[in-house]
Image (cartoon, coloured by chain):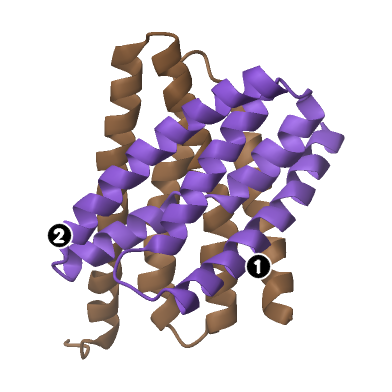
Chain colours: A brown, B purple
Amino acid sequence: MMLYVLVALFGMLGAVCRYLISVLIPNHGFPVATLLINLVGCFLLAVIMKYLARLPKFSPMLITAMGTGFVGSFTTFSTFSVESIQMIEKQWYGFAALYIVISLIGGLLASRLGFYLSDRWMDRKEAPHVH
Amino acid sequence: MFINILLVAVGAVFGVLSRLLLSNWIKRKWPMDFPLATFLINSSGSLLLGLLVGSGADNHIQLLIGTGFMGSYTTFSTFKLENIELHLKQKHTTLFSYLGLSYICGILLAGLGILLGHLYF
């Protein structure tokens, strides 16, 4: 029960952050806000699941709340899909292709970077200190 | 502004819990390498958000159901995390079918949703 309360709370915060960023960065043709949110979220989720989750001070419940709740709700796929098809409908094919490609490749790279840094940080934590 | 934030927050609570419950249920019912749960959630969410946008619902409904519910129900970060996990496990056929299907279905279903929204609402 506590898990659902935490996930709901963190999910609410994630969505409100997404909304506020979209208000601060209005869409003037190219959906900069969604792209930025999604790329940052990919990196954050990887760090939460691959680094923070291995630290004893973060309980599995808190990790689910932060990962599935906050970052899961902060990033969004449905808005991405609708924005892409709307650009295609307006025949802005170049923008649409750019948006889809940056989200596809950029998202993979952002997530991969999160995995990579998490492993490095873990290695540094586990390695014996040499002076 | 305050009412807008409240609408997004309320929608998000239901969106995030729907994703968590549905995802756990699908993973239990059909366990497989292919991340079926996220795929079905993102595809259905794209269709439903398309419907909402196509229907031309008023701004408050868009914030509650679109930005709040659908925005939180679907997720981009888990999708990419699963991609990288498949890559690290060397399951490249699954990875490419997941990537291709997610983008193609997501964008086409959003288009279909907009069309149906225009026609029927």
- The chain ID associated with circle 1 is A
Can you tell which mark lies on residue A7? 1
Q: Nearer the viewer, mark 1 or mark 2?
A: 2
Residue A71: % across, % down: 52, 56
Q: What residue is shown at x 47% (from left), y 45% (from top)?
A: B43
Callout 2: helix, strand or loop? helix
Q: Position of residue B81 (x, y in %)?
A: 35, 60
Q: Quadrant of residue B13?
A: bottom right
Residue A113 appears in view = no
Position of residue A44 measured from the top left corner of the image (x, y, whole percent): 43, 57
B4 or B33: nearer the viewer: B33
Which quadrant is home to the C terminus of chain A?
bottom left
Asked whether, in this view, residue A48 is left or right of residue B4, the answer is left
Place of residue B22 in the rendered image (x, y in percent of width and height, measured from the top left): 58, 65
Residue where numbered disc 2 is placed = B92
Q: Residue at x 42, y 73 (%)?
A: B30
Front-most of A82 and A42? A82
Secondary structure beneath disc 1?
helix
Q: Is residue B83 above or below residue B62?
A: below
Structural crowding at the residue carrying mark 1, measured as other residues with C-alpha within 10 Å and reported as few (<14), some (14–19) or many (≥20):
many
Residue in the picture at 53% in, 49% down: B74
Which part of the image, by quadrant, shows the N terminus of chain A? bottom right
How far apart in space, not on screen, are marks 1 and 2 (Cα)? 32 Å
Residue B80: tell me if it is visible.
yes
Tell how many labels.
2
> Of the residues shown, which amino acid type is indicated by label 2?
His
